Structures are given as C-alpha cells and as structure tokens.
Image (cartoon, rainbow, N blue to C red):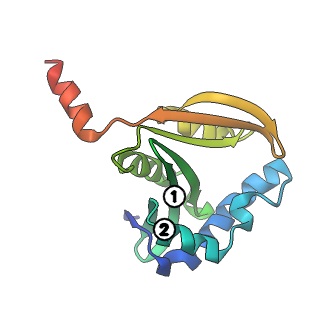
Amino acid sequence: MNIHLGPLRPAHAGELLTVQKAAYVSEARRYAMWELPPLIETLDEINRHIESGMPAIGAWDGHRLVGSVRGNVAGERMEVARLSVAPDMGGRGIGRRLLREITETAPADVRVVWLFTGGESAGSLGLYESEGFVRVDERQDDFGIRVTLEKTVIRRSAARHETLAGF
C-alpha cells in the first residue's frame, strides 16, 4: 500500500461520491438514519464545493481514490467535513492522515478547525480526540447526540519556532 495525498479536482467528484457513500453506510446503520447529509449529497454539490476553492483533499492508493476530506472556511474557523475512507481500507491510518493534512494546510487566516460527529461513533470520537480535538458541545439533534469538537491550528513554522525557543 502506497497512499499519497493531494488536492481533489472536479474529475474526482464521481469517485469521491462513491467512496463517501460507501464510508457513511455504517453510520447510517448505527443511527438508523438513511438521510445523513453525506449520503444524500449530490454530484453537483460535490463539484460546486471542489470548484469553490474550499479545501478538498484526496487519498489515493495508486490510481484508486480511497479517502477524502473537505473543509468549509468561514473567517478564522474551518469545519472539517465529509472525512471518508473506503470501508475496505479502514484501520490503516488513512483517515488520520487526511485529518492531519486538512488541519495543517488550512488557509492562513484559519485559527480553529472544528467538526461534529454522533455521540455513538466511538471510533470517530477516539480518532478526533487523539488528534487534539476537544469536545465543546453535546446536544440532541435529529440523528441522536451530536458532539462538536474543536482544535486550535498550530502552523508548522509556529510549532517549530516554539520548540526552538524552548531551548
């Protein structure tokens, strides 16, 4: 397995939609909710997101798209959205790499990245918390308990500077 990450282009939209739907079926089963936004998102909506210039990163194994993540930027905040990994590729660190990449390459003005997941999604919560996201809100919504998590963005150069300043 030789996973490489890179920007998503409009030509990837169809494959992205396929991977995303496959990845979110388990969440739909968990919550008995088949109208989860990642499952009902259309190809046109995905194309508009990619063409908008908002962050969109894919993970490939050779020529096969095996994962993706997108960001929605609003001022100093960016939502991490639609983190998806092909079900047969789960457990190999692809989701973690995508999460790190979108966080580390967020636009310069972004100071906080945030996301939400279901309260019953223990694997997702564990991943997010192990990557430094902290729970900031839990509330009931149409899908059950919705947990919102946030993380302050630390730029690579800023982190290096802080490390060097400590010596």
Task: Point out the image quarter for the C terminus.
Answer: top left
Question: In this rendering, is residue 62 above or below 150?
Answer: below
Kindly report which numbered mark, 2 or 1, lies closer to the viewer in this rendering: 2
Which quadrant of the view contains residue 58?
bottom left
Image point 44% across, 41% down: which residue? 76
Q: What amino acid is at disc 1?
A: Arg
Q: Residues within 10 Å of mark 2 (few under 14, many from 20)?
A: few
Label 2 to label 1: alpha-carbon separation: 11 Å
Which quadrant of the view contains residue 37?
bottom right
Image point 58% across, 79% down: which residue? 14
Q: What amino acid is at disc 2?
A: Ser
Which residue occupies the foreground of this view, 63 or 74? 74
Element under label 2?
A: loop
Query: Which residue is under mark 1?
Result: 70
Residue 13 in view:
yes
User: Residue 71: image x %, image y %?
Assistant: 50, 54
User: Residue 25: image x %, image y %?
Assistant: 74, 60
